[in-house]
Amino acid sequence: MARKKKKKIVSEPVGPQEHGGHKVGDKVMCFRYPDEKLSYGKITQIHLEDDSGIPCFSFACEMAGQHRLAMFDKIINEPTDQQLKKKDRSASALYR
């Protein structure tokens, strides 16, 4: 007797999907919250309703290998050469 196929459950995405020209899935370079260290990664979730009232987002940091939090006003739109080299060094050290 043939087996039944399991039905895939499609869940709705949580929270808003776009804010200020940035959407979930975009890779950004920013200074993370609260320690202001340089970070780079893909946005996973956008948080607009916060106690502080400042819009922020969660992202998967490729420099630290962890999920981090950052504010939208701390995104670096045009990173310097020094910042790009730091990103490359930390990413290569993380994945050795």
Image: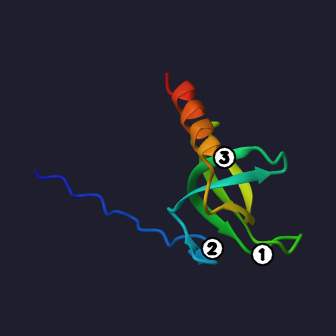
Amino acid identity at mark 2: Gly
Picture disc at residue 9:
none
User: Which color scheme is applied?
Assistant: rainbow
Give the quadrant of residue 79: bottom right
Q: Which residue is mark 3?
A: 39
- Report how far apart the C-alphas of labels 3 and 2 lie in the structure: 23 Å
Give the quadrant of residue 78: bottom right
Badge 2 element: loop
Q: Which residue is mark 1?
A: 49
Looking at the image, residue 15 lies above or below residue 77 = below
| Label 3 crowd (10 A; few <14 / some 14-19 / many >=20) | many
Badge 1 element: loop
Amino acid identity at mark 1: Glu
Badge 3 element: strand
Rendering coords of residue 54 (x, y %): 82, 72
Point out the frontmost of discs 3 and 1: 3
Amino acid identity at mark 3: Ser
- Report how far apart the C-alphas of labels 1 and 2 lie in the structure: 9 Å
Point out the frontmost of discs 3 and 2: 3
Residue sitting at 51 percent across and 29 percent down?
92
Upstream in sequence: badge 1 or badge 2: 2
Picture disc at residue 15:
2
Give the quadrant of residue 59: bottom right
Rendering coords of residue 23 (x, y %): 54, 71
How many numbered discs, if any? 3
Q: Front-most of 14 and 94?
A: 94
- Report how far apart the C-alphas of labels 3 and 1 lie in the structure: 23 Å
| Label 1 crowd (10 A; few <14 / some 14-19 / many >=20) | few
Rendering coords of residue 43 (x, y %): 58, 59
- The answer to whether residue 65 is visible is no
Q: Front-most of 1 and 19?
A: 19
